Amino acid sequence: MSNKLFQQRLNTIEELRKSGVEPYPNKFRVDTTTAQFREKFGELDAQTLTQEKNQYSLAGRIMAIRNFGKAAFFHFQDRTGKLQAFIQKDPECEDYFNLFKKLDIGDFVGIKGKPFRTKTNELTVLVEKICLLAKSLQPLPEKWHGLTDIEVRYRQRYLDLIMNTRTRQIFERRSLIIQSIRNFLLRRDFFEVETPMMHPIAGGATARPFKTYHQALNMELYLRIAPELYLKRLIIGGMERVFEINRSFRNEGISTQHNPEFTMLEFYQAYATYEDLMALTEEMLGEIVKSLFGKLQIEYQGEIIDFTPPWRRISLLDSLVSVGGFDLEFLRDAVAMRNYLKSHSIPTTGKETPGKLQVEIFEALVEPKLIQPTFVIDYPVEVSPLSRRKDGDSSKVERFELFIAGREIANAFSELNDPIDQRQRFLKQLEEREPDDDLPARIDEDFLRALEYGMPPTAGEGIGIDRLVMILTDSPSIREVILFPLLRPEVKD
């Protein structure tokens, strides 16, 4: 059926061209959107509309047609919404009506006309002129059911955007969220920057990178895992408050919460601690939620999430006891924790420290239970190689992760600015590399050299934009909030 319709529309293009109609012109100019048309005339009654003398130019994609022989109603859609139009056969616009009869659902049209109300009181454009702007060769999905196939929606996002209003709303909201974050930080004297996406050394976070190769320089490069080490160089250089809304890449699994290419906010503030960033994060996210919803309580997947500050703060160890139900003796016993993880099909290497095992148990069994906004603080030093040690307890670092709806949204810490300690931790990381790790054993000597020039006391944070948008759009999967998520190659029949 699709091939037949495709051929019919190809034939229509030839007919149009033979009759002197260009199917892909670019001369029509729009002066009014459907939303502006509704705003201007939506409250006026039928009698008042008859007095309107001005002609308005609108354009969009035809989404539905109801043909009555010598007249027709059709709905067209632009970026701001849908609107009904009416065209009829009469001596003044017979040529336009004949053109309209050759149009199909999916075609882009430009129309000029005036407002009126139908017998059912629907605001409508009375078409006085119409032109074809782009002929659609592929038929749109059946209008009553929209586009529901998840695979098709992700692979053909353009169709998803055409057919599903909710999809467009998700990405409009995503844009508003990012704008709000940017404006919030700019008002607080942060400077927006751009750092490299190709790194000579994979660093800034613990993850497997994507590799690429630069022919002219004859060198391997890595797509960035995180911009952290470059942003810290800027703090060292005296910029003091910087942020980047960046694309980062991790060559790892795909799930409802993970996409190999993702968007992060990272920001760094000199003369601040992780305590300062907890307060800033509460304020920033609370402001965004209030601006979007008019309140601080929202619903996500059936759960009410309350962003009213102050948010809960709990140490990692306390969360394992009070939320996970584990006792302290168990949490100090590496063998017992390792056996417990194995019993839950969570692999271990046999070399993990108690701190690392605590984090593994936390991520698997406690994290999903943290529904309300919760700062989990004071992580073990061995899982936080770039964080400042906690005063009074050198086995912990000044770090927090923010969890909402059972998933990690942010990671932050008071930054390690002691170059000697930093070198030792980098060396420790190299010692603990797995045998099958094919990454080169290299330390970022330039970053250490930069630290040796002195970095002021600083706190930094990364926020996963995609996961935040998931929560603020009530989306169950990260693929719903990424325009073009990575998918396996399409299998052709």
Image: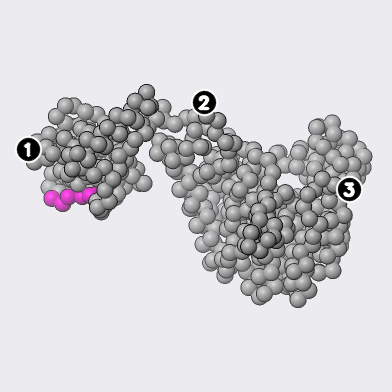
Q: Which of 311 and 246 is in front in this view?
A: 246
Q: In this view, does 281 lie to the left or right of 472?
A: right
Residue placed under numbered mark 1 in the picture: 91
Mark 3 closeness class: few <14, some 14–19, many ≥20 residues within 10 Å: some
Q: Quadrant of the N terminus?
A: top left
Mark 2 or 1, which is nearer the eye?
A: 2
Please indicate whether residue 168 sits to the left or right of residue 427 in the image.
Answer: left
Magenta part of the protein: which range? 53-59
Earlier-in-chain disc, 2 versus 3: 3
Residue under the image location 66 percent in, 63 percent down: 217
Which label lies toward us, 1 or 3? 1
Q: Specify whether residue 288 is painted magenta.
A: no
Residue kind at label 1, given as amino acid type: Pro
Residue with the mark numbered 2: 493
Say left or right for 371 vs 286: right
Residue in front for this viewpoint, 152 or 183: 152
Alpha carbon separation for disc pair 2 and 3: 51 Å
Percent position of residue 265, x then y: 60, 57
Residue 189 at what x, y percent from top left?
Answer: 57, 70
Quadrant in the picture for residue 143: top left
- On residue 353, which mark appears? 3
The residue lying at 53 percent from left, 32 percent from top is: 151
> Which is nearer the eye, 76 or 16?
16
